[in-house]
């Protein structure tokens, strides 16, 4: 029986699992990330009873993995086996900053050694792990000083990532890296077909939940809560969506709510958050929502069903219109293109360690191909909103500028460009409310010239 299976069996009685078992599962998540597996996929294999604790510890460990790896290099002349290295680095990530540690340092050290001893793949190296951690406790200040000048240790991102942000955003790169280390707030999008923002805010206040109005339809909660506790969530009164992502639908549809029923294409639509938002603003539109993954299309259906909205949902490759397009042009296209997700790394701390320096360039080619394929499907005078949840300019400004140079019938309308957390954006249809704390995003609104 595996340790996680044992853990599942023993915690079924309702007792809290011991810390050493949580550390084993967290180290497995760190190791999986290093081997190219997403944290989301790894957590799905963790027993339900362990998952909340493992997720919290994994987020912490991955946010501090750069410093932890640099410390391990100081403590060990030779890199240990992957399981032992993952467990040791997990412990260092959790305890190097005592003010931020989730448990007392001595507890973390003792339980890490216990985790090593009770696991076949690390049992033989439990003494080595113990010696490294005890040395770290003795020489903590000196070891931290030795790693302070290491870019990866200082910023807990790969060196290439830090250097790219320095080049792309010379005034804001530090801010972007600092924001990535913080937990993201929970932001709601109020379904205006059901409630005004103010009315739903009052419902939250009635149950003791504080919220700040953000953007056009958003409420940012002062404290996250399970969605089933949100008033009317199952009836579609609200959706969970970051304030930056809530910009898409109002920006694309601004001024067109009372126009003729539009045909709108939501390319790369899963899981359907923006699809639902489009229909909340413009319920009479005909929306075609595409996603290349049939299983992810099911998520679109589920979200629309909860909201009580309808769209045509199709599993198809947006970049191959010949396989799915009926020849009738669209009035508006939303292209939320595949990207590195560098703007949402605070929500997915594994992304920084999964990406490679060449990924942004390769994805930029995919983005350019999608723009090229979808632009002919737009009516003259129509709009295409290109967006990515990336802060890298290769996936934003550079892609759009290259497209404009090769398409003289494309006109760039007022757009926010790269949304930098903490910076007041321009060109947004946000009325009176700023976006509050938000993810990194890029938006470019393109209009097809008449004639």
Image: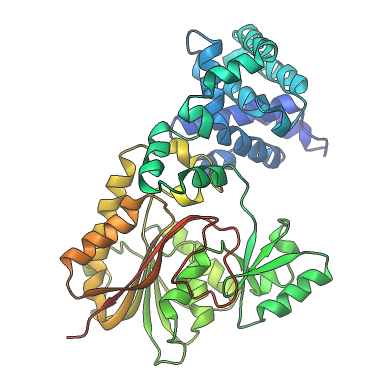
Q: Is residue 287 left or right of residue 194?
A: left
Say which of 323 and 22 sits in front: 22
The quadrant the N terminus occupies is: top right
Residue 381, quarter of the rendered image: bottom left
Residue 297, quarter of the rendered image: bottom left
**Percent x, y for residue 405?**
18, 64
Q: Is residue 296 left or right of residue 393?
A: right
Q: Is residue 193 visible?
A: yes
Say which of 168 and 396 sits in front: 168
The quadrant the C terminus occupies is: bottom left
Placement of 49 over or under 247, stated as above or below: above
Q: Is residue 230 left or right of residue 310?
A: right
Which residue corresponds to the image point at 52% horizontal and 30% vertical from the top-left? 154
Q: Is residue 83 visible?
A: no
Q: Residue furthest front?
A: 171
Which residue corresponds to the image point at 56% horizontal and 34% vertical from the top-left? 62
Say which of 88 and 151 sits in front: 151
Placement of 181 over or under 304, stated as above or below: above
**Percent x, y for residue 342?**
44, 48
So how many labels did they put on this image? 0
């Amino acid at each position: 029986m595996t340790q996680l299976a044992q853990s599942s069996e023993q915690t079924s009685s309702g007792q809290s699992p011991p810390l050493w078992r949580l550390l084993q599962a967290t180290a497995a998540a760190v190791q999986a990330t290093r081997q190219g597996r997403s944290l989301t996929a790894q957590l799905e294999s963790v027993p339900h009873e362990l998952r909340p604790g493992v997720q919290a510890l994994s987020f912490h460990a991955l946010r501090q993995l750069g410093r932890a790896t640099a410390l391990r290099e100081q403590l060990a002349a030779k890199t240990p086996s992957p399981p032992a290295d993952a467990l040791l680095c997990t412990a260092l990530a959790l305890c190097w900053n005592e003010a931020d540690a989730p448990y007392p340092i001595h507890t973390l050290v003792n339980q890490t050694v216990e985790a090593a001893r009770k696991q076949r793949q690390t049992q033989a190296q439990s003494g080595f792990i113990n010696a490294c951690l005890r040395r770290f406790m003795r020489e903590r200040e000196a070891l931290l000083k030795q790693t302070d000048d290491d870019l990866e240790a200082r910023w807990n991102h790969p060196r290439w990532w830090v250097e790219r942000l320095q080049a792309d955003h010379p005034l804001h790169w530090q801010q972007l890296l600092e924001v990535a280390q913080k937990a993201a707030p929970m932001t709601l999008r109020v379904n205006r077909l059901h409630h005004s923002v103010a009315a739903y805010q009052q419902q939250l206040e009635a149950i003791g939940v504080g919220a700040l109005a953000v953007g056009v339809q958003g409420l940012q909660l002062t404290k996250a809560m399970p969605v089933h506790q949100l008033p009317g969530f199952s009836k579609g009164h609200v959706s969970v969506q970051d304030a930056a992502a809530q910009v898409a639908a109002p920006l694309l549809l601004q001024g067109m709510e009372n126009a003729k029923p539009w045909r709108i294409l939501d390319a790369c639509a899963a899981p359907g958050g923006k699809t639902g938002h489009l229909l909340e603003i413009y319920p009479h539109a005909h929306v075609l929502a595409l996603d290349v993954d049939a299983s992810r299309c099911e998520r679109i259906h589920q979200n629309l069903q909860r909201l009580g909205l309808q769209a045509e949902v199709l599993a198809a490759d947006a970049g191959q219109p010949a396989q799915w397009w009926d020849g009738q042009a669209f009035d508006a296209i939303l292209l939320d293109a595949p990207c590195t997700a560098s703007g949402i790394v605070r929500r997915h701390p594994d992304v920084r360690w999964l990406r490679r320096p060449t990924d942004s360039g390769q994805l930029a080619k995919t983005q350019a191909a999608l723009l090229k394929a979808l632009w002919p499907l737009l009516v003259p005078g129509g709009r295409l909103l290109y967006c990515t949840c990336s802060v890298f300019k290769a996936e934003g400004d550079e892609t759009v500028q290259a497209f404009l140079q090769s398409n003289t019938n494309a006109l760039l309308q007022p757009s926010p460009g790269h949304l930098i957390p903490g910076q007041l954006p321009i060109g947004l249809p946000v009325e009176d409310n700023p976006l509050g704390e938000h993810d990194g995003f890029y938006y470019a609104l393109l209009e097809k010239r008449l004639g």
